[in-house]
Amino acid sequence: MSQEEEKIPVDESLQVMSYKTIYKTKKWWCAVVLVNAFGHNQILIYQWIWNDKVGKWKRKQKFSINYDNNWTAIKSAIEEYLPKLGGIGSGQ
């Protein structure tokens, strides 16, 4: 488990094995989380938004990668579009 102070805000039915925060501000939190759900490991990408009214993080987005062949297709598509971002290191 990551050595972060705040507990990752995922459903209690998921067994969090490890996670890495991608970015975290006062309003947004994005993390990649390795969980075991019902005996099956999954990689989940979460984005939460801070809710001032209730004083806790609320899930805004969740994306799951269940099988390595899914990841191969996702990675290929992302790598195809990366040069079109036009940022530093994109070759443009």
Image (cartoon, rainbow, N blue to C red):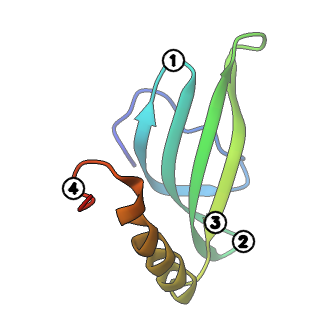
> Where is residue 51 drawn, in percent x and y?
71, 19
- Neighbour tally class for label 2: few under 14, some 14-19, many 20 plus, Cα within 10 Å: few
> Where is residue 41 drawn, in percent x and y?
57, 73
Identify which residue is drawn at 27% across, 58% down.
Answer: 92
* Residue type, label 4: Gly
C-alpha distance separating marks 3 and 4: 27 Å
Q: Which residue is mark 4?
A: 89
* Residue type, label 2: Phe
Task: Give the mark toward the camera: 3 or 2.
Answer: 3
Reply above or below: 30 against 24: below
Whether pointer 1 and pointer 4 mark residues with C-beta atoms closer than 8 Å, the reply is no
The mark nearer the N terminus, 1 or 2, is: 1
Q: Which mark is residue 43?
A: none
Identify which residue is drawn at 23% across, 62% down.
Answer: 91
Q: Within the image, what quadrant is residue 67 found in?
A: bottom right
* Residue type, label 1: Lys
- Neighbour tally class for label 3: few under 14, some 14-19, many 20 plus, Cα within 10 Å: some
> Where is residue 59 drawn, in percent x and y?
71, 39
Q: Which mark is residue 26?
A: 1
Q: Which residue is mark 3?
A: 64
Whether pointer 1 and pointer 2 mark residues with C-beta atoms closer than 8 Å, the reply is no
> Where is residue 14 drawn, in percent x and y?
67, 56
Q: Which residue is mark 2?
A: 38
C-alpha distance separating marks 1 and 2: 32 Å
The mark nearer the N terminus, 3 or 2, is: 2
* Residue type, label 3: Ser
The mark nearer the N terminus, 3 or 1, is: 1
